[in-house]
Image (cartoon, grey):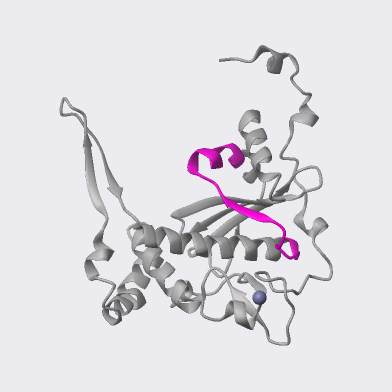
Amino acid sequence: MIDSDALESQPDEEESDIWKAVKLDDIRTNPPDERCIYCAGLSENMTEDHVPPDNLYNGVAITHEKITAPACFTCNNNRSKDDEHFRNIIVPYCAKDSSVAANLLAGKVSSGVGRSPRLKKEDYDRHEELEQITPSGIYLVRSLRFTFSPAERACMLRLYDRLSKAMYWYTLRKNPSGRSHKLLEANESIHFMEGLKKAPTQASGNPEVFQYRAIAIGEQHEFLLVWSCFFKKLSMVSISGPPEEIRKKLEAAMKAS
Ligand SMILES: [Zn+2]
């Protein structure tokens, strides 16, 4: 269906550029907000949180600055289990497309599997090869299917929540408290790709492990849009912004594209 009103009130070129890029350097907080990105507290025991987790870089040359963000000792403590779980989930998923992930799988992840009785070896061979054939027998394509369990999804969501907060701080040097961080569904992400194309691709540690693009949008640059990609394979788009505005922004972007 075509909305004729929308067609008639086509905004001019300048107005329609909802992705007008703003240099993130220009809107960075200076000096940086050094409060904990998780609880907004400031203590004597401030630490640096590494997101993406450090364990993804085992045996990988560090060629780029790593993303770090301030976290208090209490919030940063006890994250190692989640970090290990996350690595054990995504490395097998990416191993068939990334030699770096494949090396990790052969090394640390497999020994981790051996250590933990709850992690079974067969969990890491869950790539199911599917040959897609039409009902009349015409061969279409061979594809891979990988299924994540509910517990794995929950772990990934926790990690992505941390990632969104750390990226928000790292790119803007602002504390992320008071902002919502929403991971977009694939069908929602599509509407933001046009904007993300305008941002340069950057890397944390090594581009083979983690790449990202970040762009600030909104009248007051109140939203941060981030595309992140592990092992050039597992990518996500997230949006951070005022909690009550995110839904509206999402609807506006879907309408505009
Ligand atoms: Zn804290």
Q: Indicate the quadrant containing the C terminus: top left, top right, bottom left or bottom right.
A: top right
Identified at 35% across, 56% down, the residue is 148
Residue 98 image point, x, y percent = 39, 60
Relative to 156, residue 239 above or below: above
Q: Is 7 left, or right, of 22 in this rendering?
A: left
Provide the residue span drawn in magenta. Answer: 172-193
Front residue of this view, candidates 256 and 35: 35
Identified at 40% across, 67% down, the residue is 100
Most distant residue in the left direction: 137
Residue 42 image point, x, y percent = 74, 79
Q: Indicate the quadrant containing the N terminus: top left, top right, bottom left or bottom right.
A: top right
In the rendered image, which quarter is residue 115 located in?
bottom left
Identified at 79% across, 61% down, the residue is 28
Front residue of this view, candidates 172 and 203: 172
Q: Is 186 covered by the magenta stretch?
A: yes
Note whether residue 172 is visible.
yes
